[in-house]
Structure formats: C-alpha cells, structure tokens
Image (cartoon, rainbow, N blue to C red):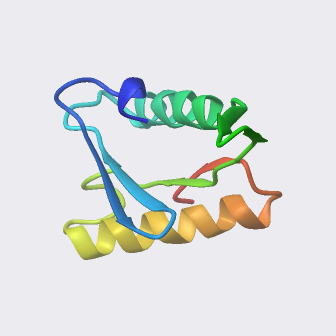
Amino acid sequence: MQGCVREMDTVARIGGDEFVVLLSVIENEQDALIVAEKIRFALNQPFEIAGKNLNISSSTGIAIYPEHGGNENELTGNADIAMYHAKESGRNNVEGVS
C-alpha cells in the first residue's frame, strides 16, 4: 500500500484488516479514486507466504474533507459507510460517499 501513495501521504493500520490512507493534498475526489484503485490493484496481485499462494481483495470507502466531514470522526464514519457500500456491491470495489 505504501508503494501506491506519495511520500507526503500516510498509510496507517487502524485495526484488524482496516487501514486509513490520508492523502494530504488532492485536487478533487477523482485523485483519491485513482489512488484507491492503485491500492486495490496492488492488493489483488497473488503473493506467496510460507510456500502457499494467496489472493486477497479489498473494499474501499472514500471520504473527502471538508465535503464529507469537518472532523476526524465524521470523515472516518462516512468512509466506513462508503466501505460497507463497496462490500455490499460485491466486494473488491471502491465507493465514495454518496
């Protein structure tokens, strides 16, 4: 995931299989969508651990400040809702706040 973002951006694990990616500067929501798709593609690549081939997928929710929340709680809450919409639409998807 770190290889899909710029040096000025932040990738943090918040628990279990959930991560937050903070893009410090973007022009519009399309920029966040492009990064989310890069991450989704990277995570979709097969990999090997202890001699076993593994595949994973990801569901991503996007929230943009200040349009989708004026503080951390609102932003993460709205991103979480968007992520669950991505899961409900078949998993391995990216969804923005609607």
In this view of the protein, which residue sits in the foreground, 25 or 44? 44
**Quick one: which residue is furthest to the front in this view?**
50
Residue at point 67%, 33% (across, down):
47
**Is 27 situated above or below 66?**
above
Residue at point 73%, 48% (across, down):
92
Question: Total of numbered circles in the picture?
Answer: 0
Image quadrant assignment for residue 37: top right
**Is 73 situated above or below 85?**
below
Q: In what quadrant of the picture does the N terminus appear?
A: top left
Image quadrant assignment for residue 32: top left
Residue at point 58%, 62% (across, down):
83
In this view of the protein, which residue sits in the foreground, 86 or 17? 17
Q: Position of residue 24 (x, y in %)?
A: 19, 37
Relative horizontal placement of residue 85, taking residue 72 as reference (left or right): right
Relative horizontal placement of residue 43, taking residue 3 as reference (left or right): right
**Quick one: which residue is furthest to the right in this view?**
90
Relative horizontal placement of residue 21, taking residue 18 as reference (left or right): left
**Is 91 situated above or below 15?**
above
Residue at point 21%, 32% (across, down):
25
Q: Position of residue 60 (x, y in %)?
A: 56, 52
Q: In what quadrant of the picture does the C terminus appear?
A: bottom right
In this view of the protein, which residue sits in the foreground, 53 or 36? 53
Q: Position of residue 52 (x, y in %)?
A: 76, 42
**Is 3 situated above or below 96?**
above
Q: Position of residue 70 (x, y in %)?
A: 21, 66
